[in-house]
Amino acid sequence: MPHKTRSWTDLIPKAAQDYIAGRRLDEVECIVGDIAGVARGKAMPASKFAYQDRFFLPNSIFLQTITGEWTDNPMGAFTEPDMILTPDWATASAAPWTADITLQVIHDVNDQQGNPVPVAPRNVLKRIVSLYEAEGWKPIVAPEMEFFLVARNLDPNQPIIPPMGRSGRRAAGKQAYSMSAVDEYGKVIDDIYDFAEAQGFEIDGILQEGGAGQVEINLAHGDPVALADQIFFFKRLIREAALRHDCFATFMAKPIEGEPGSAMHIHQSVIDVKTGQNIFSEPDGAESAEFMYFIAGMQTHLPAVVALLAPYVNSYRRYVPDFAAPINLEWGRDNRTTGLRVPISGAAARRLENRLAGMDCNPYLGLAASMACGYLGLKEKRMPRPECIGDAYMSDTDLPYNLGDALDIFSDSGPVREVLGIEFCTVYEAVKRNEYKEFLQVISPWEREHLLLNV
């Protein structure tokens, strides 16, 4: 009998195979996440994809700002050489909102010599994971995603407003954990569940947050790269679900004046590969010295990575007291006023929740930045400040107040730049400086209202 050649579709996850389920696959999207976490790449007929094992994109995709402008390459001449993209089959996922049968595949990004491109955000996260692995550790994360469903906004000069619910009234704020509030836009939630199931993603829970139309999705804990891939995919599927029902989904840190902001809280723990045990706990269940070192690393180095956790000028509008957002680097047990919270858990699940990251951050970079700080703490073996007992909003802020200040701290931090990669940090800073410069040239409605005729 002739030997049967193995198809590339045999290499993809079961959820993607089930989605195709004998139907003709029409299209494949070959994608990578850029500095902002935007999907870049190319789509092609599945028949063409089947006969190629690599694809090409210019390295300039990592020099593009969120406004579409180009930053001068701080690492040398701007010649835009091609990078080599190879499919990571484990990431193949349905695009169930499309009219035809389409798969999305995240691609690994290497240079023409076969080396990982150091400025690719997914490679930055892999770099941090490899630092843990070199020590015999396995990092575990569990992200939380907050976002707003809002009415369609076709004019950027107009403020964002909540969406219309099934009752015919606009979604109301201050309804945290309300089941009826979630039901107001239940059809969007239903599509989110359906899309996630088609893509093979596990949702740990969905709840109403404190803002008008604000939703939180919790993901099960697991591997940092796999979960960053999921968030990357989730942002797109949530937007598509919202569009089906005449509203927008936004991941801006602070889209609506007077409402809370949206965070990407990151729960982190570390497993000893040899023993399979959580290094944050002693055999008797007590907190370990490593847990304290990890907290100290976060307190010491998080200011230097705020530029990655809060990457836009809007991000800093979220850091205000009494809006369930951190303004400090205090730590405490089951204390949501602290930037670093130790949730209630058993010894095996002991973890630290980093509450600083905004949902507007690139998931690869947000996880990489947070894990880098914890890694440095484990290596430096310092002790944290005493636990904050009480209202941490009463303490002094440890955080920069705007993107410019955050970039200055980022630029001056040798340890953080070393672990994240000097070339990546140089390119990231250049892109963000360009964005900040563009913002400073915009005259806001507040300035026109209060300064035009009064000063």
Image: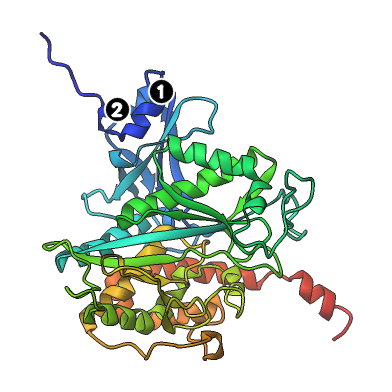
Task: Give x and y (percent) for residue 139.
Answer: 26, 63
Q: Is residue 374 visible?
A: yes
For label 1, the crowd category at 10 Å Cα-Cα, with few meaning under 14, some 14 to 19 and many 20 or more, is some
The kind of residue tagged 2 is: Thr
Which sits in the foreground, 374 or 351?
351
Q: Judge whether 242 appears above or below 313 on screen.
A: above
Name the residue furthest top.
1
Task: Give x and y (percent) for residue 81.
Answer: 35, 50
Image quadrant holding the C terminus, namely bottom right
Q: Residue at x 72, y 54 (%)?
A: 171
Q: Residue at x 56, y 82 (%)?
A: 401
Task: Give x and y (percent) for residue 49.
Answer: 35, 28
Image quadrant holding the N terminus, namely top left
Q: Secondary structure at mark 1?
A: loop
Q: Judge whether 255 appears above or below 31 on screen.
A: below
Q: Residue at x 51, y 86 (%)?
A: 392
Q: Secondary structure at mark 2?
A: helix
Q: Is residue 16 left or right of residue 149?
A: left
- Name the image quarter holding residue 315: bottom right
Q: Is residue 170 left or right of residue 429?
A: right
Q: Is residue 124 visible?
A: no
Q: Is residue 403 left or right of residue 128?
A: right
State the residue position of label 2. Answer: 9
Q: Judge whether 268 appears above or below 85 on screen.
A: below
Return the mark for residue 144.
none
Q: CA distance from mark 2 to mark 1?
A: 10 Å
Which sits in the foreground, 100 or 50?
100
- Name the image quarter holding residue 349: bottom left
The kind of residue tagged 1 is: Leu
State the residue position of label 1. Answer: 25
